[in-house]
Image (spheres, rainbow, N blue to C red):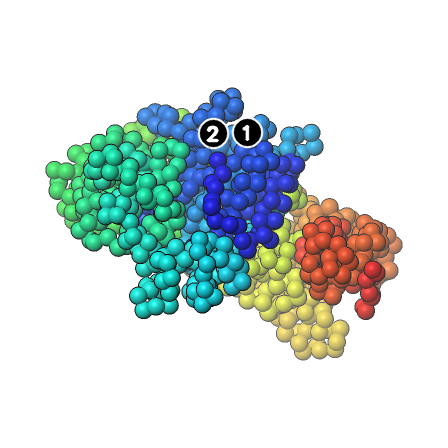
Amino acid sequence: MAQTFGTPFIGREDELARLTGVLERAQAGDPRAVLVAGDAGVGKTRTLAEAATQAAATGMTVLTGHCVDLGDVGLPYLPFTEILGVLAADDRFAPAFAAHPAVDRLLGSGTGTAPDPGSRLQLFEGMAGLLADLADITPLLLILEDLHWADQSSRDLLRFLLSRGLLQRPRPGAPAHRLAVFASYRADDLHRRHPLRPLLAELIRLPAVDRVELRPMADAEVARLVRALGTDPLSDATVRRIVDRAEGNAFYAEELLAALPGDFDPASPGMPSGLADVLLIRIEQLSETAQQVLRTAAVAGRRVEHDLLRDAVQLPEDELESALREAVGRQLLVPDEDATYSFRHALTREAVYADLLPGERVRLHGAFARLLAGHGRSAERAAERAHHSRESHDLADALTASLEAADHAQRVGAPAEELRHLETALEVWPAVDAAARPEDGDSVTLTLRASAAAARAGETHRAVHLTRAALARAGSDADSELAARVRYTLAGNLLRIDNLTAAFTYSSEALAMIPADPPSYTWVWAAATHVMAARYVGQDEDAERVARQALRTAEELRLADAQADLMISLVGLEAHNRRTPQGRDRLRAARELARGAGNIPVEMRALYSLAVGCYESGDLDECLTSLTDGLDRARRAGLLSSPYALELRYLQSLVLYTLGRWDECAGAAAADAERLPAAGGFATGPALYVALARGDQDAADRARALLDGPFDWMATLVAGIVLTDDAAVRGDAEGAVEWMRGTIARITNDTATDRPDVGVRLAALALSAVADTAVELRLTGDEAGARRWADTATELVEVARATVAKGEDGSRQGPEGLAWLARAEAEWLRARSGPDVAAWEKAVAAFGYGDPYELARCGRRLAEALLAADRREEAAERAREAHDTAVRLGAVPLREALDALIRRGRLAGAPSGAERIPVLTAREGDVLRLLTRGRTNRQIGEELFITGKTASVHVSNILAKLGAASRTEAVAIAYREGLVEPGATAST
């Protein structure tokens, strides 16, 4: 239902027009989303309500979900639960609900069943499917208010819905999604580290998501609003004073006006200086009973159920109803159809709550906690009860309720909320009497559980912090088995954040704390963790000795999953490693053991090792099979944020990139973005390789962003590749060499090797820029400068040679490494003496294992070498082949370089600008000429007597035809291809 207001709608006509335009497109089958931003009280709710009214008038079903501020306590999926509750009451939608049973858990069904590891993904997909089906029945407008208070699970679900098909244009023949989503948030609440910020930055990049910012109203509009609201004539001075004080905020203006008793002057000394004071003046005008009701309701939150409020305030029914009627009449509370009351504005509730005396606040929180406990032990009640119990200092009940809320969060697949509730429990644990604590728990075990939740949520550094806390809590009094378990868990977590030396230290301590004889489960897993840590710090002999001993013990104890884990580690230590058929057979056997034991993380480790072995051997098809199996296993188990799942996702993207399936690579990265934790950004790194190769000017900035925050080995590797290649493409030899050296230094710190496998690729990329610079200096006669860069090239090629000869695991690299070495050798020769045909023929042949982009890049250099050798026909053939690949992949910089080579060398088959670019219409030509002058869409519309929206459509068509990613790039292409001439004018 659309909310109605008595307030006139003033000053937001442009913003409303944009929203109604989105509604019209949604009804026509073009789904869109709009993020509505603005400061508190600026008019977001009012504008959305007006849009909702118009939507309802045109036959759209309007559904509103609210996010609630419960401090640091999350209530998973609350706005979506509210929306589903309304939908479930409508018989029209019953068949759609029946088709998507996964959403039932948000309606309170099935909360007592055993948790399904894949429930989070099933819930997300079920919600997406339900909304798609509902949009077939009726056009939908979903309004989500106050996203700044949204819990992480709601944010994750919103990300999933907006990036996974609901807002994409349907394929031909498929039904259109008649759906619009409007989501509001307070811009002034978003501090630098607010959790909503990264989501907003991600969503706004989606093509079907727009942003509307409600800025402060103009003074003239505020004055119109004040005069329209006034019941009695107002003096110019009074209006002016209100306008000055409101500073463009409609809500401030309304409250200042409402606080006026007759001719009360807002500038008089008795007038409060802040909005909170203004709000409290209005509240103080109520009866004492009504004020008591408002104070009690403020403790409950933005919204409170009638029955709960009645029991908390402890007033006779008639007095309560009279007080509520008074508060509703003064527009402080708004009654809802589900027997609840909401504060008309969150600031009103905050002002009332802040005015409570400390003792009064504690007493009322305690009353709500007791009432919620008496209303049953439902999961959602537990989250609210935990909040109220903590605020009322009833720490024993806060502990109990927090654990109940954590269990609920775990059942619905909300690891971030589970972690938050567990951390609350840990915070109050020391202050709770032992008799009131759970009988079957202790603080060390609880801390380890919180660490596991952090790992599932992708907060790897938090997982380390919590495991360290468990170590501190265990102290010296812990039994040796528990002490060892804490230490090897800490070692495993440290490995995930690449703190390898510390991981080895703790794994060694764990192994020393318990004897190998008699055989025990704890010793075997401590040994398995130690083997991995020892390998990473170069203690291979120690690793192999412990691995073989532990494998015998695992076989004796019939610990199949530990046996599998140790077999995987041993494959890396033996001559028949993962690149050999024998090594891969051992990995398949380990996978079967892990699968039989039900240990999914170990099974995923086996599949990851299989996939890497296939990739390094050049068997990309078999590699994809292992990757698909591993990711399917992770998806079904709800472990998509686990370490090996992220590694699998990265490798899958890398294979798609390598095979030239760039659209799939980029599409998969966008579709999976909502699944990745903050520390998992590297998993879609190959999509950055695609973006860079296609000329995306933002690719380098996005790569640098991966380096923000704590050190991450994979993120550093991905960023290093992108930034080294970016510098090379721009001809910045010094920058390319600096990024190559810096990346190798960073990823070899705290490891046993100074030759990471990626070193050969980084060296080849940097050599490209070095060779370009040496060639250019030689052409200008600067032989000394050319020799200096040739010496640098020799240094870099030695890095490539040494890496291939003996990489990370001490063995020679496979086809990919050899291909990069061939390119590095060819670039080295180019830097020393010029292009060498034989060297580039070898590089082209080496990349023939299945990398069309690098094949084309080497083909370009081979064409240059052939041209220099006056083998023109062969040069033309190589150039055409490379050009065709560049066009197919959309590799704009490479295509432009080949265009230049073909023109410069006068090679046959050079495509002209007219052949490459579809013909522009006459109107598009006019728009393009104005674009070259820097005109905005609005200015273009004014000059050509068309609307700004029509101008925007023309600009979009021009960008598509030119293959440009931005207006700036379109202008550059237009000048380069002769589509416009300097000083050209637009026709009228």
**SS label for mark 1:** helix
Residue at 25% across, 35% down: 318
- Residue 635 x, y percent position in the rendering: 47, 34
- Residue 939 x, y percent position in the rendering: 71, 61
Q: Is residue 140 left or right of residue 119?
A: right
User: Disc 2 or disc 1, which is closer to the eye?
Assistant: 2
- Earlier in the chain: of badge 2 and badge 1, it is 2
Quarter of the figure with the C terminus: bottom right
- Residue 37 x, y percent position in the rendering: 50, 53
Q: Is residue 805 left or right of residue 944?
A: left
Residue at 36% across, 25% down: 110
Seen from the viewer's position, the closer of residues 292 and 205 is 292
For badge 1, the amino acid type reads Leu
**Which residue is the site of mark 2?**
87
Residue at 29% across, 37% down: 321
**SS label for mark 2:** helix
Seen from the viewer's position, the closer of residues 984 and 757 is 984
Residue at 22% across, 40% down: 313
- Residue 495 x, y percent position in the rendering: 38, 49
**Which residue is the site of mark 1?**
134
**Label 1 crowd (10 A; few <14 / some 14-19 / many >=20):** many
For badge 2, the amino acid type reads Leu
